Image (cartoon, rainbow, N blue to C red):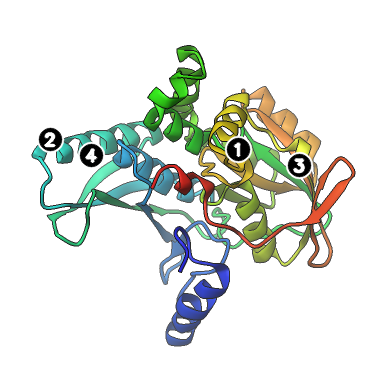
Amino acid sequence: MRIGKITENALKRSVLKPLHTEFKHDTSAAVGTDCAFSVDKKTFSTICPVTVDISDPGFYGVVKAANALVAQNIPCDHVEVSILLPVDSEESVLKKIVADAIEGCKAVGTLYAGGHTEVTSAVNRPLVTVTAVGSAEEDDALFDKKAAPDQDLVVTKWVGLEATAMIAKEKYDELATRYPSTFIHDAMDFKNILNVRKDIEAAMESGITAAHDISNGGIFAALWEFASKAGVGLDVDLRRIPIRQETVEICDHFGLNPYQILSGGALLLSTDNGERLVGDLQEKGIPAAIIGRTIKGNDRMIHNLEEERYLDLPQSDEALKILS
């Protein structure tokens, strides 16, 4: 199989089908969902393994896991961190992973409740997996809410923030041969704006029908998953998708598609009134833009000036070409 998230067809065949067969309606796993719920539908959880090769997996694992809950209007109560270390690891490696995870908890306002740590020959570099747990009343959570046809699609902040911050740090020396240090440090600082709590709080006050955490596979994967969950089509203008110049430049340098890279820190929202939502978000200091609309049917169209094409099935995250 390909590197990265498995394909949607493989997910349906080998994971979702047996789960739904065995557990009937007690399981909540589905394409396009950011988390899963317990039988009582009040306790929610999500699991985020950090498979990219970066120096601070503890931080990103915690933030990604917490965001997956928060994006569905579910406060993250605590996280549990599993750390698998190769046999030649020094204790200093473990200390840094834990310190980074604590930093991530502070960034998103949650508790590091514990986890599991093991040295094993099964891995050749540290593997960090974070489980986030939260609770909310079923009516408050967006978990089972879906977009409807003829609604505006809004993206908060900018796509590609997560991958840009990672690549800027891990490939600093190479980038420094082409860009000034201030440019690279600005890109690295995207790490500090990945928390989506304020985004979703403002969006809920304004009025939204559904939300999705834009993460693995970037905005293209998020759009596909969002439409699949809702059973709608899409009409999206590529030029309206918000993206920072740092992301454009770094992706150009490494030959990456900026619309298919890790995009934690941004949310994809649907609403009946996109202009009002964007205005409400911007009033609270949160950049946002209308990028298109949902439509009836299954067509998922991407426009770029006179060019028009169908959105493809989610591809492997482009950041893996650099961070793996």
Give the camera-side residue of 14 and 253.
253
Give how far apart the Cα atoms at labels 3 and 1 are: 12 Å
Identify the amino acid type marked 4. Answer: Ile
Quarter in which the N terminus is drawn: bottom left
Identify which amino acid the numbered label 1 is placed on. Val
Q: How many badges with numbers are in the image?
A: 4
Which residue was labeled with disc 4? 97
Residue that mark 1 sits on:
159
Residue pointed to by mark 2: 92
- Asked whether the beta carbons under mark 4 and mark 3 sit within 8 Å of each other, the answer is no
Residue 161 placement (x, y as % from top left): 53, 34
Categorize mark 3 by other alpha carbons within 10 Å: few (<14), some (14-19), many (20+).
some
Query: Label 3, on which residue?
Result: 238
Q: Nearer the viewer, residue 299 or 110?
A: 299
Residue furthest right in the image: 306
Instruction: State the residue at coordinates (63%, 36%).
Output: 156
> Of the residues under marks 4 and 3, which one precedes in the sequence?
4
**Among the 4 quarters of the image, the one containing residue 176:** top left
Type of amino acid at the residue the image marks with label 2: Ser
Q: Earlier in the sequence, mark 2 or mark 3?
A: 2
> Is residue 316 placed above or below 322 in the rendered structure?
below
